Image (spheres, grey):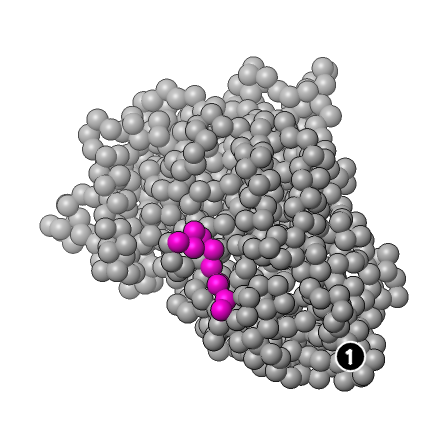
């Protein structure tokens, strides 16, 4: 019925994505603790088992060159490579490659075989080893098995058992279509790949045209949206293409069957069955491009760089009907081993995306430097690979296992260790009194705490209040945070912090991060008390203050909201309906529909709106935690109409007098318009349910404030 509902009303707000935050669909039960289970593993034993699988060719899917390493690297890369910085979604952290749609993406063709090869390892270790961790670990073992170094490996990825419905993979309804560029050639906001169903870019070139210069532009845009700079991009491409081959023995359109999700039931989840020759081994068809990059496809060396730079290459159609590049010079002809026959030789090839590295001047400077300095190449590949495969896991404290490197990278948003004693309950109570007796208002305290904590994204575990990065660039200058007022608030908070810390003789200190959250707690308690409710907002000290050196300004810019539905903020350049941003923001905050509704209603009656606007503040007592927002939004004594001042602003007029009673935005009216949200608002707006609302608001508030407290788990 839900799918039919979407068919009937395709523009309906998709509140359903919040349902995935409401319950766990996995088979392990509520008490399952993956961190504890993983720590029981003997990681060396697991790696030995992977190595054994990797070097034991199976007749049902023979290993290229007798080694599955290149296949496992591609599997790991494609699992992690779906990550994008815009919303932190994608990546390897949920083992999502084994679920639709990723399990059936054209770019993931035949990776179903890689996972089946690893099935005995997964079955042996069961709940101690997630697919998410196994896939990445297999990539690491493959790299090490073929002679390269890795920086390390961290476990901690918990498997999902349902696809993430919040991810927007693109607007196209056909595989390998590319309708995601605007008139200026810019990739649609929020996306990372340039083609539907591909991890990054078309290996033949944009729209299948072998244009290296245009391909370089696509590579740079796509990789940058996945958190990689030019040097990291080159290291990954060159390092990855040092291993293995591409498969295009014949035209895939003529010989390859449906992907796993469309395959017949007897295929048991395996797809892309080929009727060309044996359908496997040297007859394998995957991308439609055919051949190895180097003369030693299972060995770490500089063969890729040497071949690319020292020889000229020409574009031509290969046996699979796809554009690829062959060497003009005869020296490379028949210089590489055949994939399965030791007595045969083949000619290396290059992709358009490889030639792009040679033609683009910035990329070329890097590959020439790597060729001259093999050790630098190896180090850069290892670091870029670690970043690629761990970028979506959050801060280092979430990383598990004996191979976690000691070095913390700036992309991990590191935090300093606390070298002081934490405040106790008595200290917290004293500080609350100081905060409430200062010249800061309830609204200022609430908005500051929210601005700090609400940057959190459960997708990649970034953001949040820990670190107090609200006081640093770029967050302190974001329009949504009202920079001028924020500066004033922070100065007052820093004064309270300094006075408290200087008065302590026992080593106790309070961080600004804790004080910001404590201020919000105090304000919520005061607002509830003013409404006649005695509530205690839970507070756990232990947050620390990050330094500017620990904060990657460019990286954090991706967390800047264009819409904050909770503060009723809408930027000028927002094209999509703002309520869709609200639901998306709530999903990233791991909120349910009820928690989102309670938080919006509470923030409005608290008057915690952007620039203290009256938009959505449907109460005569702002700063008091009542259910007035719901009562007045749903009242039939007023009727709503669009304002002349803005298409996003609406006014509620008294039905009898015509006088304007309230002003709101789409972010407010959606709670009366959308049937699911109205059903929740009906409860909170009912007589006798105000106390329920207050406690639900407090619970949701506490949840947001501690989302990034991984140290408490």
What residue is at 67 percent from the left and 23 percent from the top?
A: 509
Q: Position of residue 365 (x, y in %)?
A: 80, 71
Q: Position of residue 92 (x, y in %)?
A: 57, 48
What residue is at 65 percent from the left and 78 percent from the top?
A: 324
On the rendered structure, is 153 left or right of 609?
right
Compare residues 571 and 298 and report the one nearer the observer: 298
What residue is at 31 percent from the left and 31 percent from the top?
A: 693
Taking the image as drawn, is residue 254 in sight?
yes
Q: Quadrant of the C terminus?
A: top right
Q: Position of residue 88 (x, y in %)?
A: 54, 51
Main SS of residues in magenta: loop
Taking the image as drawn, is residue 435 in sight?
no
Residue 377, image quadrant = bottom right
On the rendered structure, is 287 left or right of 506?
left
What residue is at 28 percent from the left and 61 percent from the top?
A: 10
Compare residues 708 and 553 and report the one nearer the observer: 708
Q: Give the answer, above or below, for where 354 lies relative to 676.
A: below
Q: Position of residue 152 (x, y in %)?
A: 73, 43
> In what element is the residue under mark 1?
loop
* Residue 440 magenta-highlighted: no
**Which range of residues does the magenta coloring cover?**
266-275
Numbered label tally: 1
Residue 248, image quadrant = bottom right
């Amino acid at each position: 019925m839900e799918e039919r509902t979407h068919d009937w009303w395709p523009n309906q707000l998709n509140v359903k994505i919040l349902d995935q935050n409401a319950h766990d669909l996995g088979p392990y039960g509520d008490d399952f603790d993956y961190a504890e289970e993983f720590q029981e593993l003997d990681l060396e034993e697991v790696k030995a088992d992977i190595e054994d699988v990797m070097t034991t060719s199976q007749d049902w899917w023979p290993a290229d060159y007798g080694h599955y390493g290149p296949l496992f690297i591609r599997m790991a890369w494609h699992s992690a490579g779906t990550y994008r910085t815009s919303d932190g979604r994608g990546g390897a952290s949920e083992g999502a490659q084994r679920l639709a749609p990723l399990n059936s993406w054209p770019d993931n063709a035949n990776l179903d075989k890689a996972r089946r090869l690893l099935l005995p390892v997964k079955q042996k270790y069961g709940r101690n080893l997630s697919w998410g961790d196994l896939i990445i670990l297999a990539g690491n073992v493959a790299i090490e098995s073929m002679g390269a170094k890795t920086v390390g490996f961290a476990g901690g990825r918990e498997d999902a058992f349902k696809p993430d419905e919040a991810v927007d993979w693109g607007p196209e309804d056909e595989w390998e279509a590319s309708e995601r560029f605007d008139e200026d050639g810019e990739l649609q906001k929020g996306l990372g790949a340039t083609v539907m169903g591909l991890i990054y870019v078309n290996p033949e070139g944009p729209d299948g045209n072998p244009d290296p210069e245009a391909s370089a532009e696509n590579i740079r845009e796509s990789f940058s949206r996945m958190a990689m700079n030019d040097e990291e991009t080159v290291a990954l491409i060159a390092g990855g293409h040092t291993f293995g081959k591409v498969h295009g023995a014949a035209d895939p359109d003529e010989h390859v069957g449906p992907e796993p999700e469309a395959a017949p039931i007897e295929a048991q989840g395996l797809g892309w069955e080929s009727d060309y020759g044996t359908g496997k081994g040297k007859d394998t068809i995957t991308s439609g491009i055919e051949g190895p990059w180097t003369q030693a496809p299972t060995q770490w060396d500089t063969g890729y760089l040497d071949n690319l730079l020292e020889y000229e290459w020409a574009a031509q159609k290969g046996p699979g009907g796809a554009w690829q590049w062959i060497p003009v010079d005869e020296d490379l002809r028949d210089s590489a081993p055949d994939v399965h026959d030791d007595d045969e030789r083949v000619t290396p090839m290059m992709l358009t995306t490889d030639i792009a590295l040679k033609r683009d001047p910035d990329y070329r400077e890097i590959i020439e430097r790597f060729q001259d300095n093999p050790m630098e190449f190896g180090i850069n590949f290892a670091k870029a690979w670690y970043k690629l495969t761990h970028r979506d896991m959050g801060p280092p404290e979430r990383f598990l296992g004996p191979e976690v490197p000691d070095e913390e990278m700036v992309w991990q948003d590191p935090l300093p260790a606390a070298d002081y004693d934490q405040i106790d309950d008595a200290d917290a109570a004293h500080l609350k009194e100081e905060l409430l007796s200062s010249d800061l208002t309830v609204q200022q305290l609430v908005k500051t705490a929210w601005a700090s904590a609400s940057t959190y994204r459960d997708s990649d575990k970034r953001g949040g209040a820990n670190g107090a990065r609200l006081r640093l660039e770029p967050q302190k200058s974001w329009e949504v945070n009202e920079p001028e007022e924020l500066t004033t608030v922070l100065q007052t908070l820093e004064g309270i912090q300094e006075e408290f810390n200087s008065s302590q003789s026992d080593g106790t200190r309070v961080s600004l991060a804790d004080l910001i959250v404590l201020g919000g707690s105090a304000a919520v308690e005061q607002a509830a008390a003013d409404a006649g409710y005695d509530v205690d907002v839970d507070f756990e000290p232990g947050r620390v203050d990050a330094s500017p050196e620990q904060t990657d300004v460019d990286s954090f810019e991706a967390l800047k909201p264009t819409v904050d539905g909770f503060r009723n903020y809408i930027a000028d350049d927002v094209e999509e309906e703002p309520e869709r941003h609200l639901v998306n923001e709530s999903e990233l905050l791991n909120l349910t529909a009820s928690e989102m509704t309670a938080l919006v209603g509470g923030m409005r009656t608290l008057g915690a709106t952007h620039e203290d606007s009256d938009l959505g503040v449907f109460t005569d007592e702002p700063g008091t935690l009542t259910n007035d927002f719901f009562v007045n939004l749903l009242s039939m004594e007023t009727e709503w109409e669009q304002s002349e001042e803005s298409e996003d602003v609406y006014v509620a007029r008294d039905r009898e007098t015509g006088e304007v009673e309230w002003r709101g935005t789409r972010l407010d009216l959606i709670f009366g318009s959308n049937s699911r949200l109205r059903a929740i608002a009906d409860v909170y707006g009912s007589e006798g349910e105000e106390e329920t609302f207050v406690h639900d608001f407090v619970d949701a508030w506490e949840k947001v404030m501690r989302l990034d407290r991984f140290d408490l788990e």
